[in-house]
Image (tube, rainbow, N blue to C red):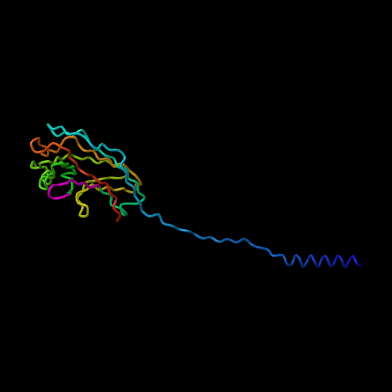
Amino acid sequence: MKNNNLIKSLILITTVLIGTVQTYGYAEVEQSVTTDVQPSVAISKITSQETGTINPANGVNTGLSASFKLQTNGTDEDYDFIVTSSILSMDGGEVSAYGQNGCLLFGNTASLPTASAIENARIGGNENRNVIAYPLTMGITNPMSVGFTNSTQYGDCWAVKVNNGTEGTLTQTVGQTPVVNTYSVGQDEAGAYRATVTFTAVSK
Protein backbone atom coordinates (compact mmCIF):
# COMPACT_ATOMS: atom_id res chain seq x y z
CA MET A 1 0.00 0.00 0.00
CA LYS A 2 2.82 2.28 0.90
CA ASN A 3 4.51 1.57 -2.38
CA ASN A 4 1.35 2.43 -4.34
CA ASN A 5 1.04 5.73 -2.52
CA LEU A 6 4.69 6.50 -3.21
CA ILE A 7 4.24 5.75 -6.92
CA LYS A 8 1.13 7.94 -7.05
CA SER A 9 3.01 10.74 -5.33
CA LEU A 10 5.87 10.51 -7.82
CA ILE A 11 3.43 10.54 -10.75
CA LEU A 12 1.74 13.60 -9.27
CA ILE A 13 5.01 15.43 -8.71
CA THR A 14 6.19 14.55 -12.20
CA THR A 15 2.93 15.76 -13.69
CA VAL A 16 3.14 19.05 -11.80
CA LEU A 17 6.75 19.62 -12.93
CA ILE A 18 5.91 18.89 -16.56
CA GLY A 19 2.94 21.22 -16.37
CA THR A 20 5.12 24.15 -15.28
CA VAL A 21 7.76 23.81 -18.06
CA GLN A 22 7.61 26.82 -20.50
CA THR A 23 8.39 26.40 -24.18
CA TYR A 24 9.69 29.12 -26.58
CA GLY A 25 9.05 29.45 -30.33
CA TYR A 26 11.33 31.05 -33.06
CA ALA A 27 11.51 34.88 -32.96
CA GLU A 28 13.27 37.37 -35.26
CA VAL A 29 13.60 41.17 -35.50
CA GLU A 30 15.00 42.89 -38.61
CA GLN A 31 16.10 46.49 -39.06
CA SER A 32 17.40 48.05 -42.28
CA VAL A 33 20.10 50.70 -41.99
CA THR A 34 20.62 53.01 -44.99
CA THR A 35 23.19 55.65 -45.79
CA ASP A 36 23.84 57.63 -48.97
CA VAL A 37 27.06 57.89 -50.95
CA GLN A 38 27.23 61.42 -52.27
CA PRO A 39 28.62 62.24 -55.75
CA SER A 40 32.36 62.77 -55.59
CA VAL A 41 35.23 63.40 -57.96
CA ALA A 42 39.02 63.39 -57.99
CA ILE A 43 41.36 64.94 -60.56
CA SER A 44 45.11 64.42 -60.51
CA LYS A 45 47.96 65.23 -62.86
CA ILE A 46 49.68 62.07 -64.11
CA THR A 47 52.51 63.23 -66.33
CA SER A 48 53.52 66.48 -67.92
CA GLN A 49 56.13 68.24 -70.01
CA GLU A 50 55.66 71.76 -68.72
CA THR A 51 58.77 73.52 -69.94
CA GLY A 52 60.42 73.73 -73.33
CA THR A 53 62.30 76.06 -75.61
CA ILE A 54 61.23 78.11 -78.63
CA ASN A 55 63.39 78.45 -81.71
CA PRO A 56 63.82 82.24 -82.12
CA ALA A 57 64.00 81.94 -85.90
CA ASN A 58 60.59 80.35 -86.47
CA GLY A 59 58.83 80.01 -83.11
CA VAL A 60 58.84 76.19 -83.13
CA ASN A 61 58.77 74.80 -79.57
CA THR A 62 60.24 71.55 -78.30
CA GLY A 63 56.86 70.15 -77.22
CA LEU A 64 54.58 70.60 -74.22
CA SER A 65 51.95 68.21 -72.85
CA ALA A 66 50.08 67.18 -69.73
CA SER A 67 47.86 64.25 -68.71
CA PHE A 68 45.14 64.34 -66.07
CA LYS A 69 43.34 61.43 -64.43
CA LEU A 70 39.64 61.86 -63.68
CA GLN A 71 37.75 59.59 -61.27
CA THR A 72 34.11 60.05 -60.31
CA ASN A 73 31.06 58.19 -59.08
CA GLY A 74 28.87 60.98 -60.44
CA THR A 75 27.53 61.95 -63.86
CA ASP A 76 27.26 65.01 -66.06
CA GLU A 77 24.09 65.76 -64.11
CA ASP A 78 26.18 66.11 -60.95
CA TYR A 79 29.19 68.01 -62.32
CA ASP A 80 30.42 70.18 -65.14
CA PHE A 81 33.86 68.88 -66.14
CA ILE A 82 35.70 71.76 -67.81
CA VAL A 83 39.20 72.73 -68.89
CA THR A 84 39.80 76.48 -68.80
CA SER A 85 42.90 78.57 -69.47
CA SER A 86 44.31 81.97 -68.62
CA ILE A 87 46.94 84.38 -69.84
CA LEU A 88 48.04 87.53 -68.03
CA SER A 89 47.71 90.84 -69.85
CA MET A 90 49.25 94.20 -69.10
CA ASP A 91 45.98 96.12 -68.94
CA GLY A 92 43.22 93.56 -68.57
CA GLY A 93 44.39 91.16 -65.89
CA GLU A 94 43.82 87.45 -66.51
CA VAL A 95 41.86 86.56 -69.64
CA SER A 96 41.16 83.31 -71.46
CA ALA A 97 44.18 81.85 -73.23
CA TYR A 98 42.09 80.03 -75.85
CA GLY A 99 41.93 81.21 -79.42
CA GLN A 100 40.31 80.00 -82.62
CA ASN A 101 39.57 76.26 -82.69
CA GLY A 102 40.78 75.92 -79.12
CA CYS A 103 44.40 76.89 -79.78
CA LEU A 104 46.42 77.98 -76.74
CA LEU A 105 47.92 81.47 -76.39
CA PHE A 106 51.21 82.00 -74.55
CA GLY A 107 52.14 85.43 -73.19
CA ASN A 108 55.52 86.89 -72.31
CA THR A 109 55.83 86.86 -68.50
CA ALA A 110 58.36 89.72 -68.24
CA SER A 111 56.90 92.04 -70.90
CA LEU A 112 53.19 91.38 -70.56
CA PRO A 113 51.13 91.66 -73.75
CA THR A 114 48.24 94.09 -73.98
CA ALA A 115 44.64 92.88 -73.98
CA SER A 116 44.33 94.01 -77.61
CA ALA A 117 47.43 91.99 -78.61
CA ILE A 118 45.92 88.90 -76.98
CA GLU A 119 42.62 89.47 -78.77
CA ASN A 120 44.47 89.88 -82.06
CA ALA A 121 46.32 86.59 -81.55
CA ARG A 122 43.01 84.97 -80.62
CA ILE A 123 41.63 85.62 -84.11
CA GLY A 124 44.89 84.85 -85.92
CA GLY A 125 45.90 88.43 -86.71
CA ASN A 126 49.44 89.75 -86.97
CA GLU A 127 49.39 92.59 -84.39
CA ASN A 128 50.03 90.47 -81.34
CA ARG A 129 53.27 91.56 -79.74
CA ASN A 130 54.51 89.16 -77.04
CA VAL A 131 51.75 86.60 -77.68
CA ILE A 132 52.30 83.30 -79.48
CA ALA A 133 49.49 80.86 -80.31
CA TYR A 134 49.95 77.10 -80.73
CA PRO A 135 47.42 74.46 -81.80
CA LEU A 136 46.13 72.32 -78.94
CA THR A 137 45.02 68.70 -79.18
CA MET A 138 42.87 67.14 -76.46
CA GLY A 139 42.58 63.36 -76.23
CA ILE A 140 40.55 61.33 -73.76
CA THR A 141 40.01 57.65 -73.01
CA ASN A 142 36.63 56.01 -73.63
CA PRO A 143 33.84 56.24 -72.71
CA MET A 144 34.51 59.93 -72.03
CA SER A 145 34.58 62.60 -74.72
CA VAL A 146 35.77 66.20 -74.99
CA GLY A 147 34.99 69.16 -77.23
CA PHE A 148 35.80 72.86 -77.46
CA THR A 149 32.91 75.21 -76.73
CA ASN A 150 31.97 78.70 -75.65
CA SER A 151 29.88 78.46 -72.49
CA THR A 152 27.80 81.31 -71.07
CA GLN A 153 28.96 80.19 -67.62
CA TYR A 154 32.64 79.37 -68.23
CA GLY A 155 33.47 81.21 -71.44
CA ASP A 156 35.83 79.48 -73.89
CA CYS A 157 36.55 76.02 -72.51
CA TRP A 158 36.98 72.37 -73.34
CA ALA A 159 33.97 70.48 -71.96
CA VAL A 160 34.44 66.87 -70.85
CA LYS A 161 31.56 64.38 -70.81
CA VAL A 162 31.98 61.27 -68.66
CA ASN A 163 29.24 59.37 -70.58
CA ASN A 164 28.53 57.05 -67.63
CA GLY A 165 32.20 56.30 -67.14
CA THR A 166 33.91 56.13 -63.77
CA GLU A 167 37.44 57.14 -64.67
CA GLY A 168 39.52 58.22 -67.61
CA THR A 169 42.56 60.14 -68.74
CA LEU A 170 42.63 63.52 -70.47
CA THR A 171 45.80 64.35 -72.40
CA GLN A 172 46.51 67.78 -73.86
CA THR A 173 49.31 68.25 -76.35
CA VAL A 174 50.58 71.61 -77.55
CA GLY A 175 51.54 71.63 -81.22
CA GLN A 176 55.13 72.56 -81.94
CA THR A 177 54.52 74.93 -84.85
CA PRO A 178 52.96 78.31 -84.01
CA VAL A 179 49.65 79.36 -85.50
CA VAL A 180 50.21 81.47 -88.66
CA ASN A 181 50.78 85.20 -87.97
CA THR A 182 51.19 84.76 -84.21
CA TYR A 183 54.98 84.56 -84.07
CA SER A 184 57.33 87.25 -85.26
CA VAL A 185 61.04 87.72 -84.52
CA GLY A 186 60.51 91.47 -84.62
CA GLN A 187 57.46 91.54 -82.30
CA ASP A 188 57.93 88.76 -79.78
CA GLU A 189 60.57 89.63 -77.21
CA ALA A 190 62.94 87.06 -75.73
CA GLY A 191 61.89 85.55 -72.41
CA ALA A 192 59.51 83.01 -70.89
CA TYR A 193 56.04 82.62 -72.40
CA ARG A 194 53.29 81.08 -70.29
CA ALA A 195 49.70 79.89 -70.35
CA THR A 196 47.86 78.34 -67.39
CA VAL A 197 45.42 75.46 -67.96
CA THR A 198 43.02 74.27 -65.25
CA PHE A 199 40.93 71.08 -65.24
CA THR A 200 37.96 71.55 -62.90
CA ALA A 201 34.87 69.63 -61.79
CA VAL A 202 32.15 72.06 -60.76
CA SER A 203 29.30 70.70 -58.64
CA LYS A 204 25.85 71.57 -59.99
Q: Outermost residue, front direction?
A: 110
Percent across and percent down for residue 44 are: 32, 44
**Residue closer to the observer: 169 or 129:** 129
The x and y percentages for residue 93 are 16, 50
Q: Is residue 112 magenta?
A: no
Image quadrant for the C terminus?
A: bottom left
Q: Residue furthest right?
A: 1
Identify which residue is drawn at 20% across, 36% down. 175
Tell me residue 95's x, y (percent).
17, 49
Q: In the image, what residue occupies the spot 15% across and 37% down?
A: 191
Q: Count the numbered circles shown.
A: 0
Q: In the drawing, does residue 4 fall left or right of residue 185?
A: right
Residue 110 in which image quadrant: top left
Range of residues picked out in magenta:
83-93
Secondary structure mainly formed by the magenta segment: strand
Camera sees residue 142: no
Quadrant of the image occupied by residue 53? top left
